């Protein structure tokens, strides 16, 4: 089933945000992307709005707090990276990050038994309603270069 695009104005209105060109532009950008974006990526792609990195960061973090943008943190032996991704209803994804070039790929893979296994092994939680899973590895391009 294809994933429908979001309506940025409706999403902003439903979450109590003022509808501004920058916010609509940010949500349109996220909706058009296949993979999560870093703040540096967002800044490059939003140049036409003439917003500085701090303004973009604050807007994205406000969307994270509102619950429609997901913040993804990757820790490797080389670096710590943060990316942002639009949460689309009925689309559950995970991500793989290359530890060398920071390429990130969204994968439509999920093993729901992870939640039931976590619940069975938890001593403190009765229910688990969601999970996030990220992988760190070496992309094919970097693997060829490292040989």
Image (cartoon, helix red, strand yellow):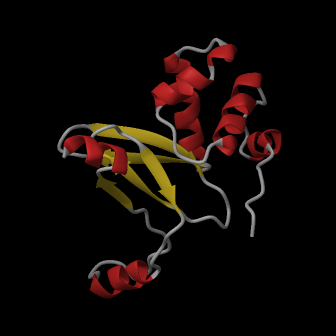
Farthest residue to the top: give it.
50
- Tell me: residue 135, above or below residue 36: below
Q: Is residue 31 left or right of residue 73?
A: right
User: Is residue 87 visible from the viewing direction of this image?
Assistant: yes
Foreground pick, 113 / 107: 107
Residue at the image position 35 percent from the left and 51 percent from the top:
140
Res 111 quadrant in image: bottom left
Residue at the image position 30 percent from the left and 78 percent from the top:
124
Q: How many marks?
A: 0
Res 28 quadrant in image: top right
- Residue 46 % position (x, y): 63, 22
- Residue 14 % position (x, y): 77, 47
User: Is residue 99 visible from the viewing direction of this image?
Assistant: no
Q: Is residue 79 left or right of residue 135?
A: left
Residue at the image position 67 percent from the left and 35 percent from the top:
29
Foreground pick, 116 / 140: 140
Q: Is residue 111 left or right of residue 44?
A: left
Res 82 quadrant in image: top left
- Tell me: residue 100, above or below residue 118: above
Farthest residue to the bottom: give it.
120
Quadrant containing the N terminus in the rendered view: bottom right
Q: Is residue 45 left or right of residue 99?
A: right
């Amino acid at each position: 089933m294809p994933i429908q695009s979001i309506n940025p104005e409706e999403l902003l209105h439903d979450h109590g945000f003022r509808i501004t060109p920058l916010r609509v532009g940010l949500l349109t950008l996220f909706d058009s992307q296949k993979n999560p974006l870093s703040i540096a990526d967002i800044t490059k792609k939003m140049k036409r709005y003439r917003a500085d990195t701090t303004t973009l960061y604050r807007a994205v973090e406000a969307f994270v707090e509102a619950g429609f943008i997901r913040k993804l943190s990757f820790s490797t032996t080389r670096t710590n990276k943060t990316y942002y991704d639009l949460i689309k209803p009925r689309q559950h994804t995970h991500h793989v990050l290359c530890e060398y070039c920071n390429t990130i790929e969204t994968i439509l893979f999920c093993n729901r038994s992870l939640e039931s296994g976590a619940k069975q092994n938890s001593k403190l939680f009765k229910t688990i309603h969601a999970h996030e899973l990220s992988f760190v590895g070496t992309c094919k391009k970097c693997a060829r270069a490292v040989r």
